[in-house]
Amino acid sequence: MLAINANLARCHVCGKVSHLPSEGAFACPRCHTPLHFRTPYSVSRSWAYTLTAAICFVPANLYPIMNVQSIDKSFTSTIMSGVIDLAQNDMLPIAIVVFVASIAVPLFKLIGIIVLLTIVQRGKPVKRQQAIRMYRFIDFIGRWSMLDIFVISILVSLVSFGQIASIEANIGATAFGAVVILTLLAAESFDPRLIWDLQDTEDDRTEL
Amino acid sequence: MKQDEGDTITACLECDLLLARPAPSKSREARCPRCGSRDSASRYFTSQTSLAVSLAALIVAIPAHLYPQMEFTLLGRPTTYTLTEGALALIDKGFLWVGGLILLSTVVAPLLLLVCIALISLLWSMQQAWAFTARLLKLFHYITSWAMLDVYLLSVIVSVVKLLDMGKLELSTGFFCFVAMLVLTTAATLLFNSEACWNAIEKHQHAGD
Ligand SMILES: [Zn+2]
Ligand SMILES: [Zn+2]
């Protein structure tokens, strides 16, 4: 049996299971967090964060994230040009790491959340085990996109030799930071129980 | 003392299945039979271990924040880098928002997390200040996903590789203390069980009735 069918809900902060009246607001008796059967407005909030993140993803990739200045050369670096630079300097493993963390992960996350949201909104039977695996993966990988942001901060602080060589952050970094935070919030707003509220395509074998 | 549903029944956070509350287990976390998700609330929790590990992490956190992590030398001129400097450099150059985010995820959140675990474990062993413990538990809940020391470690490695062909780079004391802090922080987080603490608070409230 599901908790919602017994009018029970588990508090997401302290874990206490309480009886929830079908109408009106109710707070957890143990930690006073508002209790709900499902995260309120989960789908619309998640859509809002995801779409904003998708919009920020464009400037994050088009605008430079760093300005590099040294005696012989001076150039701006976007996320992609940074990856290409590493690959051309025989540092392919690191280039792959940066590519995965900065481009593949945010992109996969955006697409993944959009797929999950569409599945939930359509309300048709799905392979729930597959959908929940995707949700868990998205939830797990999200934070690793912070990699490039941290790298920028280390480089800016370490390479500051005035006229000789210096690295400065650029507007792309702000946009990229926004993408990371917004996708984190989008995944956090999504209530995985909505996947299990759908019918499974296989049969009702797993329905308890 | 009256047992209520919270003590014997639990629900899966991922699929909402009603379950009998699993007994605390040292070996593995309980899994939901319907969706397979692990429930960290079934972790075996002892306040002594938790206190010891979090205090050890806080102790190595001091040199990890004070000593430089690396030294970069270009044309004979050295610069050093300390954990907080990257965030502060960005804030200083007007990237307030991004700098603040880095400061939160590499300094503020991890330290708050450790202080929370240490204080909660300490108050648990002293059986005191339950209301304050409840506040700390809430703070712990909201701060925990913002600590990103593991990601930061990878970014130090990436930065080192990027700078190697520009000049001379050496890792120093601060970096090794940071790695120790990361290992201990991860251990402290995995050994902690906030639901066990909430249960203790509730039992105390009932006992007071
Ligand atoms: Zn609660
Ligand atoms: Zn489940």
Image (tube, grey):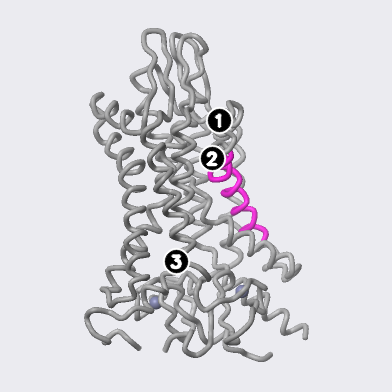
Q: Nearer the viewer, residue A75 or A3?
A: A75
Q: Which mark is residue B102?
A: 2
Label 1 to label 3: alpha-carbon separation: 35 Å
- Chain bearing mark 1: B
Q: Name the quarter showing ligand 2.
A: bottom left
Local crowd at mark 1 within 10 Å, few (<14), some, or many (≥20)? many
- Tell me, yes or no, whether the highlighted magenta stretch contains residue B102: yes
Q: Mark 1 points at which residue?
A: B90
Q: Which of B126 and B136 is in front in this view?
A: B136
Q: From the viewer's perspective, is residue B116 above or below residue A161?
A: below
x, y percent for residue A98:
33, 38
Do residues under tags 1 and 2 come within 8 Å of each other at their CB atoms? yes
Q: How many labels does the image show?
A: 3
- SS at badge 3: helix
Image depth: mark 1 or mark 3 in front:
3
Which residue shows up at 33% across the image and 58% down it?
Answer: A112
Q: From the viewer's perspective, is residue B178 above or below residue A159?
A: below
What's under tag 1, amino acid-wise? Leu
Which residue shows up at 37% across the image and 8% down it?
Answer: A72
Q: Mark 3 points at which residue?
A: A43
Side (left or right) of A123 relative to A15:
left
Label 3 to label 2: alpha-carbon separation: 28 Å
Which residue shows up at 51% across the image and 18% down it?
Answer: A160
Side (left or right) of B73 relative to A98:
right
- SS at badge 2: helix
Q: What stretch is highlighted in magenta?
A: B100-119
- Chain bearing mark 2: B
On the question of residue B175 being in view, the answer is yes
- SS at badge 1: helix
Callout 1 and callout 3 share a chain: no
